[in-house]
Image (tube, helix red, strand yellow):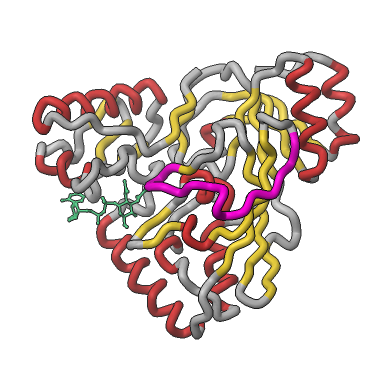
């Protein structure tokens, strides 16, 4: 979608918002799939309420993009524009056991930065790509931990009140790959409370998680991590594997040979290919196990 209204375009510099015309979402997502649309890069949190009022007033549909690592975007010209936070210079500020982190910060970099300052707890997240904001919204987790356990405060733009609010950790519910944030809430920053641990010990934990991940996940390939959530008490990857579906393809969309719950873009896969592969696998799991798999990956398809 192209922002046509000159009033909006003229107001953007004052709001510290950069307009990037016809940005390819394939270039902004780890799956490397997705069509094009105008992208607004936001440099100042405080300008968000004004920007969103302007977009709503002019009826411009929009979506918030984090690091694009857990996202499958539709093909062709997209019917909404995309908003994304630009990273500030200092995105992690430490004070005692607290880390104040900008939502645009890279998750892995934040984990290592805290580790170097003897703050641990998040070793499991080390190989998870994406931003801190995205991890927060999805309550990202791995190897027995989840980011929600460490959240003490979140600065969020709430679409319902049209204001920036600070929520305390207890006001938010963090469940398995799900939080109580509304879909149109925009994560801005988070305050984490992390346990003190010597760097060497944290590093050891990080090495173990890295090793496990390297041996079980297709890290060098274009993917969005796990496609389906694990059903209670079961593993989606194991079920898909048991059905012999590793390597199953639709066009260049392919079930990974390494981990059956990772679907990779082995070349020039389209969203159509990937969606067809997802429903094909879902259907087979349904008929073999009578289990309805739920998407773990976020899908923006129209
Ligand atoms: N398995 C197979 N075949 C496969 C994949 C897995 O038999 O192709 C078996 C494994 O041998 C193991 C079991 O299934 O016995 C579970 O596999 P794994 O340890 O890889 O964990 P997972 O349940 O498939 C979850 C998360 C991952 C996270 C890992 C490590 C979900 C949907 N997935 O995977 O998160 O990295 O645990 O904690 O919760 C993601 O969220 O995108 C993601 C990759």
Q: Quadrant of residue 245?
A: top left
Residue span colored magenta: 163-178
- Decide if residue 189 is on the left or right side of residue 69: right
Q: Residue at x 43, y 68 (%)?
A: 123
- Asked if residue 171 lies in the magenta stretch, the reply is yes
Q: Residue at x 52, y 18 (%)?
A: 76
- Decide if residue 57 is on the left or right side of residue 82: right
Name the foreground residue: 7 vs 118.
118
Name the foreground residue: 53 vs 161.
161
- Asked if residue 283 lies in the magenta stretch, the reply is no
Q: Residue furthest front?
A: 170
In the image, residue 20 above or below residue 86: above
Q: Whole-percent x and y of residue 266?
A: 34, 38
Q: Whole-percent x and y of residue 97?
A: 61, 74
- Decide if residue 18 is on the left or right side of residue 77: right
Q: Residue at x 67, y 31 (%)?
A: 159
Q: Residue at x 43, y 42 (%)?
A: 178
Q: Quadrant of residue 239?
A: top left
Residue 23 appearing in the image? yes
Residue 222 appearing in the image? no
Q: Whole-percent x and y of residue 179?
A: 48, 43
Rendered-image quadrant of the N terminus: top right
């Amino acid at each position: 979608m192209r922002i046509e209204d000159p009033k909006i375009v003229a107001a953007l510099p004052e709001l510290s918002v950069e307009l990037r015309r016809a940005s390819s979402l394939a270039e902004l997502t780890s799956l490397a799939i997705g069509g094009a649309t105008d992208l607004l890069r936001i440099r100042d949190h405080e300008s968000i309420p004004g920007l969103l009022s302007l977009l709503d007033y002019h009826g411009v549909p929009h979506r918030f993009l984090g690091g694009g690592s857990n996202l499958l975007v539709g093909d062709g010209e997209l019917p909404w524009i995309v908003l994304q936070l630009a990273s500030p210079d200092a995105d992690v500020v430490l004070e005692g056991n607290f880390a104040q982190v900008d939502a645009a910060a890279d998750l892995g970099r934040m984990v290592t930065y805290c580790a170097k300052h003897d703050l641990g707890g998040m070793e499991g997240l080390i190989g998870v790509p994406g931003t801190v904001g995205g991890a927060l919204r999805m309550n990202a987790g791995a190897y027995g931990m989840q980011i929600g356990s460490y959240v003490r405060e979140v600065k969020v733009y709430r679409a319902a009140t049209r204001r920036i609010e600070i929520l305390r950790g207890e006001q938010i519910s963090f469940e398995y790959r799900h939080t109580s944030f509304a879909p149109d809430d925009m994560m801005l920053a988070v305050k984490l409370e992390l346990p003190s641990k010597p760097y060497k010990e944290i590093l050891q934990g990080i090495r173990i998680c890295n090793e496990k991940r390297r041996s079980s996940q297709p890290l060098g390939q274009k993917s969005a991590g796990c496609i389906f959530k694990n059903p209670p008490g079961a593993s989606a990857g194991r079920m898909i594997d048991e059905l012999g579906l590793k390597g199953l393809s639709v066009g260049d969309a392919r079930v990974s040979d390494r981990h059956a719950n990772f679907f990779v873009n082995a070349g020039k896969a389209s969203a159509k290919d990937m969606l067809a592969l997802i429903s094909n696998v879902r259907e087979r799991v349904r008929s073999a196990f009578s289990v309805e798999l739920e998407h773990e990956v976020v899908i923006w398809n129209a």
